Image: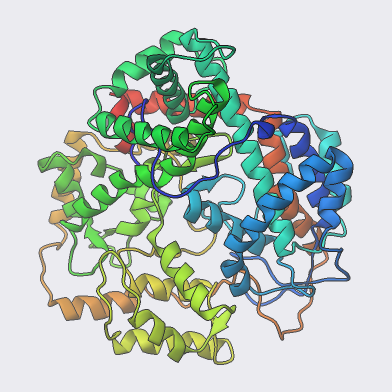
């Protein structure tokens, strides 16, 4: 999602908490201590069963800690000052997380298991900041599928001792309370803030400016421009002044440059107006506050280009809403100059954006394509800024109204018929076939529809086909950035002009021009595309199931994934820096969507 916009422009949109000077101190030690403390509180003994491949099974709890146990441990490790600040942030985060928390199945003690915790935090950061947190996103796999060895090798390298610390603390894990999950979110925000300060120091170095003295306005603009280059390119701390200067020059040719620069100035103005009267607007601390607010808002600001891409795709939509026939997709690239629609069939298939329910008439699934990693831009060691998943806000509204993990088909129909989207006008009457499908889902679950199951997500895709992605089975897809796809598969991620022409001719020779009425197509498509396989985020209560002997280890591994991924990003940056540099250089050589602005 999101466009790569100009360097000197960054923020807008939602309300973001302004940074304070105290946040800049002792963040790394805090992060390790917090994660260790979180590890003491995490837990799960599942009562797993039925097909829950894509999602964690339910777990049982032997006991629960005092609500303030985690804060007590943080106070012991970091002092009372940290406890006061953290507790203040946690209260706000608890309120923000509460609607999703209420809608998720719970373990005894009103706790969430690891898959549900990871899912809730992923949803939170996407909706609030449009941050796709690497440690929380599923990436096409099961929410509980990550192994400890993969995480430790990638992030920590030889840190076997750190791995042992987490293993010991995760043996008796019991899941997370709402407060503990909020503390984990607060810790992540602190780590992101620390990274911002590090990036700002690099920007100072490459511009030759000093943090000890107040800067002139033009110096601040230059500093923010350099910061934005580092942010968008995910550059490492070793970036040179020449590299930043060259990229900045390319940014200035981008049509998004001037609007973004204007937007960033507006954010800067708002932050400066909120400063105390005697504060220096161009001090290092003040500029850090301005950039932090900008980074909070940038994700939603940058989503405008995603909206533009979706609008363009809708022009080529076929008879089925939300689907673009592949021949029209390639035709737009070949004849209309929409070069961003040139991904290869293999790339689209692996990414989960290609519908081949009718092999002779493959189509691109609009919301799945919009959500591809190749449409992400900017970000950090912890997150990427991607296109907004419009279904998240729709589901969030249902969660808020239902405030439970499951609901009756009738209540869901009533709510959805009153729920508008960017392309759906409400109120409306849902098709009988769609209502029948909802009752079929409920019949599989004792008369109620689990809100966080694959079948209900599939139902939402059919109710809002232009906003809600088609939910593939866990592990069936592997969305990758274009360079990563080519390195892993040896296949091309995008087609050149001659290849597009040949592919278009092949597609149009296989019957794409056969016509059917819209109703015939829609009825046939719903039947063809509907898959009866269920996957639950958490197994619903009331079923006594036997846990495999190795499930405890897997559960501990998933808990370890959440915590260690955050710590590892601070302990080892070389791998992520090399990856970002490779992706960015790939974008420069072969433009892909938003990143093309560098050219």
Q: Position of residue 75 (x, y in %)?
A: 85, 45
Q: In this picture, is 365 found above or below 209?
A: below
Q: In this picture, is 283 found above or below 435?
A: above
Q: Does 220 sit left or right of 336 as displayed?
A: right
* Image quadrant assignment for residue 438: bottom left
Q: Does 92 sit left or right of 204 as displayed?
A: right
Q: Does 371 sit left or right of 525 as displayed?
A: right
Which residue sits at x=73%, y=38%?
152
Q: Position of residue 586 (x, y in %)?
A: 39, 26
Q: In this picture, is 571 found above or below 515?
A: above
Which residue sits at x=44%, y=18%?
223
For this orientation, the residue located farthest to the front is: 277
Q: What number of labels is visible? A: 0
Q: Position of residue 202 (x, y in %)?
A: 54, 17
Which residue sits at x=70%, y=63%?
178
Which residue sits at x=65%, y=50%?
185
Image quadrant for the C terminus?
A: top left
Whether residue 150 is visible, yes or no, is: no
Q: In this picture, is 126 found above or below 579?
A: below
> Closer to the camera, 351 or 434?
434
How are the colours assigned in the image? rainbow
Q: Position of residue 426 (x, y in %)?
A: 27, 77
Whether residue 356 is visible, yes or no, is: yes
């Amino acid at each position: 999602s999101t466009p790569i916009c100009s360097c000197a422009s960054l923020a807008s949109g939602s309300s973001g908490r302004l940074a304070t000077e105290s946040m800049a101190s002792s963040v790394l030690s805090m992060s390790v201590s917090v994660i260790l403390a979180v590890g003491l509180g995490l837990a799960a003994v599942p009562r797993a069963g039925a097909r829950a491949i894509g999602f964690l099974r339910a777990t049982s709890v032997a006991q629960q800690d005092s609500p303030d146990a985690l804060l007590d441990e943080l106070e012991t490790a970091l002092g009372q000052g940290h406890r006061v600040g953290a507790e203040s942030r946690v209260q706000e985060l608890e309120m923000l997380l509460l609607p999703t928390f209420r809608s998720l199945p719970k373990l005894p003690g009103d706790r969430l298991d690891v898959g549900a915790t990871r899912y809730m935090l992923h949803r939170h950061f996407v909706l609030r900041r449009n941050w796709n947190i690497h440690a929380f996103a599923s990436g096409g796999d099961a929410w509980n599928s990550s192994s400890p060895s993969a995480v430790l090798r990638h992030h920590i390298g030889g840190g076997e001792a750190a791995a042992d610390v987490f293993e010991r603390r995760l043996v008796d894990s019991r899941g997370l309370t709402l407060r503990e999950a909020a503390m984990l979110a607060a810790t992540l925000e602190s780590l992101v803030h620390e990274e911002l300060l590090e990036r700002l120091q690099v920007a100072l170095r490459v511009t030759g400016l000093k943090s000890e003295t107040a800067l002139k306005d033009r110096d601040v603009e230059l500093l923010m421009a350099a910061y934005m280059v580092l942010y968008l390119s995910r550059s490492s701390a070793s970036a040179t002044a020449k590299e930043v200067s060259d990229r900045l020059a390319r940014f200035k040719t981008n049509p998004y440059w001037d609007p973004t620069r204007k937007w960033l100035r507006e954010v800067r103005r708002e932050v400066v107006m909120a400063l105390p009267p005697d504060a220096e607007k161009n001090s290092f601390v003040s500029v850090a506050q301005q950039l932090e607010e900008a980074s909070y808002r940038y994700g939603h600001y940058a989503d405008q280009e995603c909206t533009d891409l979706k609008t363009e795709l809708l022009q080529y939509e076929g008879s089925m809403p939300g689907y673009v026939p592949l021949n029209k997709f390639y035709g737009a690239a070949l004849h209309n100059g929409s070069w961003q629609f040139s991904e290869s069939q293999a790339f689209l298939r692996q990414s989960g954006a290609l519908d081949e329910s009718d092999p002779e008439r493959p189509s691109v699934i609009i919301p799945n394509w919009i959500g591809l990693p190749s449409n992400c831009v900017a970000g950090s060691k912890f997150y990427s800024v991607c296109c907004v998943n419009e279904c998240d806000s729709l589901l969030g509204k249902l969660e808020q109204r239902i405030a439970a993990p499951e609901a009756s088909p009738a209540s869901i129909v009533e709510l959805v018929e009153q729920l508008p989207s960017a392309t759906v006008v409400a109120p409306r009457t849902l098709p009988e076939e769609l209502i029948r499908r909802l009752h079929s889902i409920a019949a599989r679950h004792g008369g109620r529809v689990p809100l966080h199951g694959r079948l209900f997500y599939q139902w939402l895709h059919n109710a809002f086909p232009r906003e809600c992605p088609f939910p593939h089975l866990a592990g069936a897809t592997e969305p990758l950035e274009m360079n990563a796809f080519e390195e892993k598969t040896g296949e091309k991620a995008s087609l050149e002009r001659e290849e597009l022409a040949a592919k278009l001719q092949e597609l149009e020779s296989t019957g794409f021009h056969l016509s059917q009425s819209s109703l015939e197509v829609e009825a046939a498509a719903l039947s063809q595309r509907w898959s009866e396989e269920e996957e639950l985020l958490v197994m619903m209560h009331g079923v006594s199931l036997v846990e495999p002997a190795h499930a405890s280890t897997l559960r501990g591994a998933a808990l370890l994934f959440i915590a260690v991924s955050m710590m590892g990003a601070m302990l080892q940056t070389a791998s992520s820096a090399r990856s970002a540099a490779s992706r960015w250089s790939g974008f420069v050589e072969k433009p892909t969507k938003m990143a093309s602005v560098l050219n």
